[in-house]
Image (cartoon, rainbow, N blue to C red):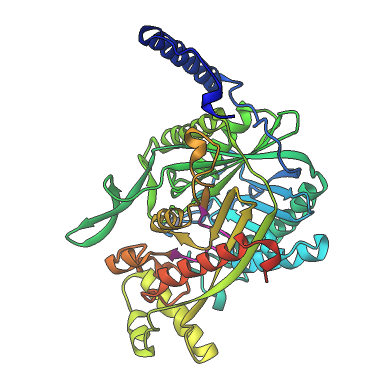
Amino acid sequence: MNQQTINVPQPKPQMRSWILLLCLIAAASLTCRKAVERPGAAPNLQQEKWRAGVASAVITPEQSMWMAGYAARTKPSEGKVHDLRAKVLALEDDRGTRLVIVTVDLIGIPRPLRDWLERQVYRHHKLPPESLLLNASHTHCGPVIRETKYSIYGNSFYGLSPEQIQRSEQYVEALQEKLLQLIGQAVEKLTPSLLSYSHARAGFAMNRRLETEQGYRIRPNPDGPVDHDVPVLRVDSPDGELRAVLFAYACHNTTLSFYKFCGDYAGFAQQYIEEAHPGTTALFVAGCGGDQNPYPRGGERSLEYCQHHGRALANAVEAALLWRARPIRGPIRSVLETVTLDFAGPPSRRQLQQQAESDDKYDRRHAQVLLEELEQTGKIRITYPYLVQVVQFGNDMTIVALAGEVVVDYSLRLKAELAGPPSAGMIGASAAGPPVWVAGYSNDVFGYVPSLRILQEGGYEGGGAMRYTNLPGPWAPSIEKRIVDKVHKLVNKARAPLETRQ
Ligand SMILES: [Zn+2]
């Protein structure tokens, strides 16, 4: 049909403005209705079928234990504010491919614990290593879990008594069995579900690297880089019941520094979300908050600050739940590989012997552990096998899970570099490209992972914190490039069409 065959009467100019006005009013009312439509409802869109299962367990130590995070503590724990928890979200796409996400209110994930769990979940559930993602909230009000048989060369960084070390070992042994059981429970409970993504923001994380005349110090730096994004993966039943909320924030979980067990702000955020949505499991994922602190923090009012931060984060999740979430479709494609990171070069025996005489007990211990390594193996390690994991959800979302205490530069850079093209046919925030979610503190938490910028600037995250580990440090300048290149390689693999995957 062409225009010449139709004789449509054209409205007069005055009438035309009326029609335009009516059209605008109609459009505005439609938009308003859209904005208030079923707030918090699951996306009412055709999706591929998922199955999801969740499980949660208390992992608070049953007895007093030495607490992790602050080397300056002088006594073991004295009670609790609330329970520490481990939680599991198991997902299965319509091809039967699974992803199991485990979150814990603990300082970190010791690599040997991951290795053990990896073997067991393969044995019991045929779950391959790339399908297991572990993340720790990095609360500094949990038990010490590093000073166990897993501590290389038996060095005790916290200067624990043999009895305290034994308690820590027993705790970790019980923990790993509990995590295995929890994974089994979540897998058993797999039921039809819908997955969707939305996000919001929370502002209490502040950059904590301030340049001073004495170099970079841990102080609030309101002008430093931050990542205030709060990504949220929601799991709903097919009839719209909220089952689980997986959410993240890039900030140290260090409002508190006292002697009671507590999940810090992340623990409170999970508690508040679960209280507001009975029957829902809230799982916190630590982002790239290696150089971020929650402010204000510490002091006599620290518990109050902590609850406020928890509320702020829970509110951000609630805000994200209001928005019409983007449907997340499968299939799941997970990739897990190691990339070799280099240290700048080990100190000589002579340097270490000098350091072992230091007045500073942490320098002394660091030198002693490296000297012990030298004695036992004839050398000091010069590389580290760094774990990088990528999980791709169809064309809809990418999760990058990085090991160690990753600084915010990585999440800002990777999100910018990996962002996909805007989604066709979507409007507003939904038109943004498929989300890229970058987690730190995943699978192996061994120490800080600075960007090249921070490595060169120095300070605590740049290399100073290495003295609290059994690693030689600092890292070689290649660290950022090695990690970012590996992430790109794995993302390309995970995003490649199935038939071309190797
Ligand atoms: Zn830390």
Tell me the quarter of the picture where residue 127 sits. Answer: bottom right
Residue 191 x, y percent position in the rendering: 80, 41
Q: Residue at x 36, y 73 (%)?
A: 363
Q: Residue at x 64, y 57 (%)?
A: 133
Query: For this view, does 189 lie left or right of residue 259?
Result: right
Magenta residues, start to end: 438-448
Residue 437 x, y percent position in the rendering: 52, 50
For this orientation, the residue located farthest to the front is 4
Task: Check the image and report above or below for 502 versus 322.
Answer: below
Query: For this view, does 102 lie left or right of residue 184?
Result: left
Q: Nearer the viewer, residue 118 or 49?
A: 49
For this orientation, the residue located farthest to the bottom is 378
Residue 376 x, y percent position in the rendering: 54, 88
Indicate the quadrant containing the C terminus: top left, top right, bottom left or bottom right: bottom right
Instruction: Give the tally of numbered discs.
Output: 0
Indicate the quadrant containing the N terminus: top left, top right, bottom left or bottom right: top right
Q: Nearer the viewer, residue 132 or 355?
A: 132
Q: Residue at x 34, y 89 (%)?
A: 350
Ligand 1: quadrant of the figure: bottom left
